[in-house]
C-alpha cells in the first residue's frame, strides 16, 4: 500500500511511453498498473502509471525533482500522488440523504479509502446522519442574499480541514464562481439526469413531462457553467408509461448513489484525467 | 389472425373497464389481450383490447356503429383496427442504409406484418437496395428551394399508394409542416441520440464533444417541432474515452436499427397510444 | 390508502375480465389499477385488480364471502389483500450487511410500506446495525448439527411475531425443507449471480473463473431446490478483464441491493403472481 | 494503414513494458496504441502494441528475427500481425440467416476489414444470400454418420482458401475435436444465451421455461467442450412475463448479431488475447 501514482497528459510524441516506463524501471520501481490513451483528434497523450515504492531507489520527497526534467522535455501536465496520503473529503448534503448514507457506509466498510472530516448542509435534517457515523456536522443556512458571505466561511473551514475533494451528494444549492475557483477539478456533483438532457432543477419532472423511456444520472466535476462540467460517469434505468413521477424518483435515487459512488471512487483512486471539458477514466 | 383491436383513451371514469369488456363479451368475442393504464396525473384512462372475430356476433362492418354509443357515453378517443388489413409502409432513406436494410429484411422474414410498396430517397444510392428487395424506388432530389413543390408530389404518391405509415430510416431531410400535417401520428423517425439530448444535426459529434459515457437512439413520432415528438422507444450503449467518433457512429448504428425496428413493430401491432406528446406502449 | 387488491389466476375463459370488473363496479368500487395477462402456452389467465374501498358497498369482512361464488365459477386461485394491513417482514442477515442496511433505510424512509419486527442472524456482527435502526435482534448460531432444532425455534418466533415475509438479505445458510414449507412463497432470497448461471456458493468466484463479461444478481422465491425458485427480478452490470474478483464483488453488491429491493417492494405491493415456478410481475 | 501489431503475454516481470516500448522506439516506430494488463491472480502480463511501419527502421520481414531475443528473455507468448494482410474469414451458417446477413453487410460497408472467400452450410437455404453478396457457397450436408468424412473435406477447403477465421453464424451443428484442433482460437461461435446459463440446444426455450427476466447472447471461441470456450463478448436484453417464446427469439436475434459482430471485429482488429480459458479484450 506504499505506492506512487503519476497522472500525465501532454502532446503525443514519439518515445514518450518508453521514457516514462524507463524512468520507473531504471530506479527499480515495479510497475503495477500502466494505462495510456491517445486522443487522435486532439493529439494528446494520457498516462496513468502506478508503481510500488518499496524497492524504488528515489526517496519519496525527491521524486518530483527527479521527474521534472522529463516532464519539461515532453511538456507534461502531471500530478504525483502517494497512496499513503489518505484523501480527505467533505460531503455537502441536503434533504435527500440516500447518497450521503451510501458514501458514509462505503467509507465505513472500506470500499473507499478516504477520511470524511465533515458534512456540511443548509439544513439541520442531515445532522442525525452525521451523528450516526460520528462525523462533524456544520449547518450553513445559505440563501441568495448571504450566499457569498457564507461561502467564504465554508471555504475557510474546508481549507482549515485540508479537504482534497468536495462531494455534492444531492446538495440542492448552486455554488458561486468564487467557491468553484477555489477547488478546481475537486468538486464532484451528482446530477439526477442523463446530461446534457434536463439541465437545472427538477430533472425527473422534466423527464416525466417529456415522456422519455429511460432515465439517467450523471456524476461530473463542477465548473462555473451549471451541470456542464466534465462527465465522469453515467448510468441509466428503463422506465415506461406505467412509471409515475414518484417511480422515476425512486428508481433514479438507486442510480444516483451508484453513479456518484463510482465517480468518487475513481477520483480517490486517481484514475481520472481531465482535458477539454472531458474525462479519461482508467477504470 | 382474424382479430379486432381497439385503442381507447378517455377521461378516467367508474365502470369503464367493465363496460368495454362487457361489450366484447356480450357479443361472444374472446378477449385475447387487454391492457389498460391510468395516468393519475392527467386522469386519463387508456385501453388496448384485442379479440378474435371468429365467434364475434357483430359483423366487422357494423362494429363501429355498435360501439359508438359506448364511445360517446365515455367521451372516448378511439380507433378500431382489423388484423386482416395489412398496413402499408413507405420507407424514406438517405445515404446510411443500415436501418433500411434492417427493415426490409424483417419484412421479408415476417418479423413485421406489413407491405412496403415503396422506398423514397433524395439520393440514387438507395436504388440498388430497393432493387435487391424488389421494392419500387422513387428518387425525389429535394433541396431548400424546391422542397415544398417536391413534397406535394411525395404526398400525392403516398396517398395514391394508400400508405399507412411513413418510416424515416435515417432520412436526413426535415419535413415541412404541410407534409407532417398530412400524416398525423403516422410518421416515425429514428434520431441518433438519447433525446432530448443532442437535438438536430450530427448528434454523435455533439455527444463526442460533450464527453458523454453513454450514447443512445430514440424512435419517435414526427411533429412540427424538430426531434420533439412523442417518444416511442429509446435504448443506449456505453462508450468511454477510448471510443473515437467513428466508434460512436458504428455502435450507434446498431442501436438505431434495434430501436427503430421496435418502434415500427409496435406501431404495426397497434400497441401505441399517443397523448400529451407522450406514448403509452402496451408492449 | 384504504384499498383492496385481488390477485387471481385461473384457466383462461371467455368473460372472465368482464365478470371480475363487473363485480367491483356493480358494488360501486373505483378501480385504480387493473392488469391482466394470459399465458397462451399454458392457457392461464392472471389478473391484479386494485380498487378503493371508500365507496365500496361491501364491508371489508364480507368481500371474501361475496366474491367466492365468482371465484368458484371460474375455478380461481385467488388472494385478497387490504392495503391497511401493513405487512411484517423478518430480515435474515449474515456478515455482509449492505442489503440489510439498504432494506432498513428504505423502511425508515417509507420507500417500503412494512414493519420490521425482527432481524435474525447466525452472527452477532449484525447486532449493531439492528440497534442503529431500533429493531429487535436475535442471534441463532446454527450449524449442520443443530440446524433442525434451531430452525424450530426460528419458526416459532416468526409465527409468534406474525411474520408475512422472510427476506434473506445475503443470509449465507441454506434453509431446510421443513422451514421452507412453513412459509410457501413467503421467503425471498437474493442470489449474487445471474441465475441459472452459478448456482451455489461463491458465484462471483465462479463468474471470475469462467471469464464472463457481465455479472448479475437474482431475486427469487425460495423453494426446496437450491437457487431454483421462481425468479422475481434480475439485473446485470458489465465487467471486463480489468475487473478483479474484488471488483466483481463490489459492483455485484450494488446490484444485489437494487435487485433485492425491487423484489421485496413488488411483493409488499402485491404485484407478484406465482405459477409453474415462474412469476408474473405487474410492475 | 501500414502498421504492425504485437500481442504478448508472459509472466509479469520488472522492466517488461519499458523493454517492449524501447524496442519500438529505438527503431523509430511511432506507437499509436499501447494497452497492457496484469492479471495479479495469475501474475501474467498482457500487452497489445500497435505502431506505424512508415518510419520503422526494421524491414517487415526482419521484425520477427529482431524481436525474438527480447521475447525469449521475457519468456513471451507472442504474435505479430501486419494490418496490410487482410484476414480471410469463412462463415458457417444454417437456417437462421440474420447473423449471416449482418456480417456480410458489415463487410460490404467496410465496418470489418476482411475478405469472405466462402460461406458454408448444411442447407441450401443459405445459397441465395451468398449469391446476393457474390460470395462462393458450399453445401456440405452433414449428419452424425458422415460428419467425420465431410469435415475432412471442409478442412481441406478452408486450408486451400487460406482461411484465418471460421465464424459460426448460428450454425446449428457441433464440430468434432478433429475440426476444432485444426483451427485453435480461430473459430468464433455465437451462442444464444448468457453463458454459462443454458448450454446446448434450444436456449431460448430453456430460458422461457426457467422464467428469467433477462436474456443474453455470448460470442466465444470454440473449444472441444460444448459452449465452454473463452468468452469474448456478452450482452443482454430485458424480458418479462409478457414475452412469449417468439418474443424471446426475436429480441434474442437482435442481440446475437450485435454480440457476434463485436466479437468478430475485435478478433479481426487483433484486440483479443486468450489465456486460461478467458479473454483479454483491449477494446
Image (cartoon, coloured by chain):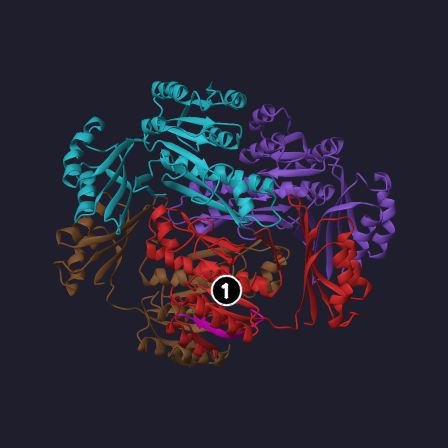
Chain colours: A red, B cyan, C brown, D purple
Q: Say whether residue A111 is visible.
A: yes
Coordinates of residue A14 in the picture (x, y in percent) = 77, 48
Coordinates of residue C197 in the picture (x, y in percent) = 53, 56
Q: Residue at x 61, y 73 (%)?
A: A86
Q: Is residue A149 above or below residue B150?
A: below
| Image quarter of residue B72 | top left
Coordinates of residue C136 in the picture (x, y in percent) = 38, 80
Q: Nearer the viewer, residue D228 or B23?
A: B23
Q: Nearer the viewer, residue D169 or B214?
A: B214
Q: Residue at x 55, y 71 (%)?
A: A163
On screen, residue B56 versus residue D199, left or right, reads: left
On screen, residue A39 versus residue A233, left or right, reads: right
Q: Residue at x 13, y 51 (%)?
A: C26
Q: Specify the quadrant that holds the C terminus of chain C.
A: bottom left
Which stretch did the figure color magenta? A112-122
Residue ID for mark 1 = A179
Amino acid at each position: 500500500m506504499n505506492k506512487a501514482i503519476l497522472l500525465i497528459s501532454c502532446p503525443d510524441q514519439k518515445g514518450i511511453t518508453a521514457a516514462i516506463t524507463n524512468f520507473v524501471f531504471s530506479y527499480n520501481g515495479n510497475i503495477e498498473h500502466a494505462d495510456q490513451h491517445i486522443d487522435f483528434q486532439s493529439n494528446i497523450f494520457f498516462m496513468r502509471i502506478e508503481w510500488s515504492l518499496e524497492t524504488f531507489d528515489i526517496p519519496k520527497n525527491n521524486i518530483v525533482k527527479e521527474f521534472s526534467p522529463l516532464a519539461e522535455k515532453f511538456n507534461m501536465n502531471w500530478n504525483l500522488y502517494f497512496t499513503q496520503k489518505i484523501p480527505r473529503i467533505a460531503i455537502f448534503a441536503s434533504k435527500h440523504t440516500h447518497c450521503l448514507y451510501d458514501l458514509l457506509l462505503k467509507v465505513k466498510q472500506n470500499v473507499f479509502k478516504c477520511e470524511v472530516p465533515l458534512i456540511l448542509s443548509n439544513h439541520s435534517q442531515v445532522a442525525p446522519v452525521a451523528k450516526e457515523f460520528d462525523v462533524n456536522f456544520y449547518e450553513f443556512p445559505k440563501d441568495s442574499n448571504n450566499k457569498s458571505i457564507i461561502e467564504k466561511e465554508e471555504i475557510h473551514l474546508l481549507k482549515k480541514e485540508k479537504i482534497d475533494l468536495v462531494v455534492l451528494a444531492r446538495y440542492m444549492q448552486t455554488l458561486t464562481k468564487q467557491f468553484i475557483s477555489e477547488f478546481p477539478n475537486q468538486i464532484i456533483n451528482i446530477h439526477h439526469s442523463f446530461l446534457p438532457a434536463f439541465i437545472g432543477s427538477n430533472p425527473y419532472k422534466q423527464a416525466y413531462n417529456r415522456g422519455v423511456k429511460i432515465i439517467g444520472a450523471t456524476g461530473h466535476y463542477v465548473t462555473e457553467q451549471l451541470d456542464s462540467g466534465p462527465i465522469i460517469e453515467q448510468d441509466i434505468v428503463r422506465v415506461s408509461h406505467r412509471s409515475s413521477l414518484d417511480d422515476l424518483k425512486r428508481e433514479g435515487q438507486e442510480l444516483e448513489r451508484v453513479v456518484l459512488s463510482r465517480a468518487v471512487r475513481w477520483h480517490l483512486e486517481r484514475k481520472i484525467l481531465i482535458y477539454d471539458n472531458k474525462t479519461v477514466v482508467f477504470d
